[in-house]
Image (cartoon, coloured by chain):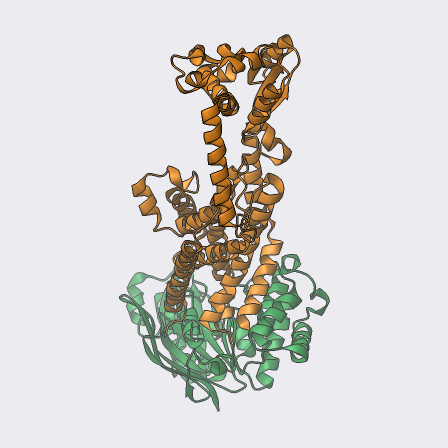
Chain colours: A green, B orange
Amino acid sequence: MNCLEVSGLKKTYGDVTVVDDLSFHVAEGEVFGLIGPNGAGKSTTMMMIVGLLKADGGTIKFDGQIYNPQNHEMRSRLGIVPQEIAIYPELTAIQNLRFFGRLNGLRGQRLKQRVDAVLDLTGLTRNADHTPSTFSGGMSRRLNFGIALLHEPRFVVLDEPTVGIDPQSRTNLLDCVQQLSQQGVGVLYASHYMEEVEAICHRVAIIDHGKLLRQGTLDELLDRSGMELRVTVASFPAELIPKLSSIAEVISEPDGKSSIVIRDTLSSTTAKHSGKLRVVLDVLENAGIPLLSVKSQEMSLETLFLSLTGRTLRD
Amino acid sequence: MGAWEITVKDLRLIAKDRGALYTLLALPIVFIAILGVSTGQLITTHDEAKLVKIGIVDFNETELSEHVIHDLSAIGGLKIIRITDRNEAMLQLQDGRCNVVVILGKEFSDRVEDLDLSDVFDMDRGKLAQGLSAIDMHVESGTAFVGVADLVQYVVLSAVLRVVAPEVARRNPLMSRMIDRMVQAHEKELEEQGPPDTSRPKPVKPGPSIIYQTLVPAFMVMFAFFLVNIMASSFINERKLGTLRRLQISRVSPVELLWGKTLPFLLVSIAQSTLLFMSGKIMFGMSWGTYPWMLIPVLVTTSISATGLGLLLATYVHTESQVSSYSTFLVIVLAGISGCYMPRDWLPELMKNVSLATPHAWALIAYQELLTLDRPNLTRVFGCCAVLAGFGIICFAIGCRRFRRLEYPT
């Protein structure tokens, strides 16, 4: 069953369309990655999903019901880990947890149990009585994450939860996300870090300029895009470029060399790659251009994103 | 319930923020104490500082001269210093220990004995046309009063006449009988009126501390509105930290959230005002007026209007610098318009009317009524409280509406 269903979501500011007809769904226990560069519309999408921003079009459903942010019961099914560290630096970790726990309706023994459980989960038990001003960035991020889990939400939205974090805390957080998934919690995970997304997400949506470019499982996305072949030569005459333009891209490298890149992202097969490589090698041989190297690179989310948008994720 | 959690949390944060605490609680007291020192009215020195010190040398030493001295000492604002030697009196006048020296000569009582009714009722042509010297009295003014020496002479002469005139009148048998009859008629009239009503509250005690009756409430009202700044900053901080989003997606409704953010500042404001009134009483001998309990509704409604305004401001500002500039403008300008910097009675009529657009003015009117009048008009005070509460509630309602529109899109 789907925890979250987003359909035809749209947001505009004046003439600028920030989110354009975005549709996806997240199943129970699924970790769904939302990737895109800065300004792609990820945070806007997330704010609309949690009800902090009004959508100009489309629908958002939780457990099959249209989401109404005014509905306390529906709202309490949600947990959000904002990009910023949204905790009170003057209060201790346990005071922060107790405060947000009470706001979400936890009281007495139940509150105590949940606070203890979250401290344990995030590895902050020993620092419970310390203020976040004494914490490392990673510890603050873990507390930020833990607050969202206090009331045991059925769906958690994580917006860049590992920015500026140490490796130990990153591992802890990713383990926590996987635990949530095992408990049947749906997770929407936005990140710049492709290795994280590849490690924990079951399905991924790639967005840019507010539009959905691709979505599917990692296997589907990466298989579909296939491999990249890169042939490097000392220099490649401009008059020969038209001969290869239909099958490859010629790139001038910063060191003065030229690379001929064969990149089929949709339905290429190894056989097709081989055919194109043969054509490139023939052109080089006929022109007497010496070959410096031939490299093959398996497609990653990073390279997939580059092939889809022409820019890297961190641009 | 969520509102109370937010209130407790904010009170905890305010308690940890020493700067905010200092601004809200200590600064007003320090400020008023400085004013107290500047005006020479702080603690025990206040009576001394403002009293006119009169040195009296009595060479006459009769019942009549004693009567005159006793009457002078009963006049408020004067301090009578008895001096036995004329030279010593002049020395004290020179070095400022005395402001005025009054000398009753040896012939004082005899000269008074020589006066008749025409001298008292026709002072321009009778023996008293020469002034006080006619009854062997001499007045010397010190440097501080030299410009008003004639006025001082006149005041002393009036005080002396108050004692002397009945004595002179009684020496005339006709007048004596007439005075007796008038006294009897007055006593009968008082008997018919019955005993004085002891159930009535004691009136406000006049004296130098009356300045604080105006000063303390004026600055209390001004400082109550200082929390507009801290309140708006608290909202900005929640936005900056991202905790506002967390509050918004919790089970707390927008009204609960705003009530929770407002209540701690209302409590702090009430504590601030209470502290100021207590300091006023302890440090400056300030009176709480005929009806001290009536200060409570004025104090509470003033705090309601200040916190309402703070909430409204919080929905308009987005940066710390906006908070700083808008709140400073509000605090200083509104205080100026309303008459917090000077007694409202000094304001021109137009300004008084304009000032009624500010909550400060209504608070000041209510405090003035309660603290400076013997019989305050309680209906007027309750009216002021209603305006103050209404102002706060309207600001809160507009603030809620704006907050909902800005932060809770539907």
Looking at the picture, how far across and down is residue A281, in whole percent? 40, 72
Residue at 59 percent of width and 22 percent of height? B69
Camera sees residue B312? no
Query: For this rendering, which residue is in front, A87 or B69?
Result: B69
Q: Nearer the viewer, residue B151 or A264?
A: B151
Q: How many marks can you see?
A: 0
Q: Residue at x 49, y 68 (%)?
A: B257
Q: Nearer the viewer, residue A145 or A194?
A: A145
Q: Quadrant of the C terminus of chain B?
A: bottom left
Q: Is residue A290 above or below residue B321?
A: below
Name the quadrant of the N terminus of chain B: bottom right
Residue A123 sits in quarter: bottom right
Asked whether the viewer can see residue A54, the reply is: yes
Q: Residue furthest left?
A: A15
At which x and y percent is residue A226?
Answer: 44, 80
Residue B110 in the image, given as x and y percentages of width and height: 56, 12
Q: Is residue B22 left or right of residue B387?
A: right
Farthest residue to the right: give it: A126
* Residue extending furthest toward the bottom: A1
Q: Taking B213 as reference, is B322 left or right?
A: left
In depth, the one of B299 and A207 nearer the eye is B299
| Residue B409: image location, x then y, percent | 37, 72
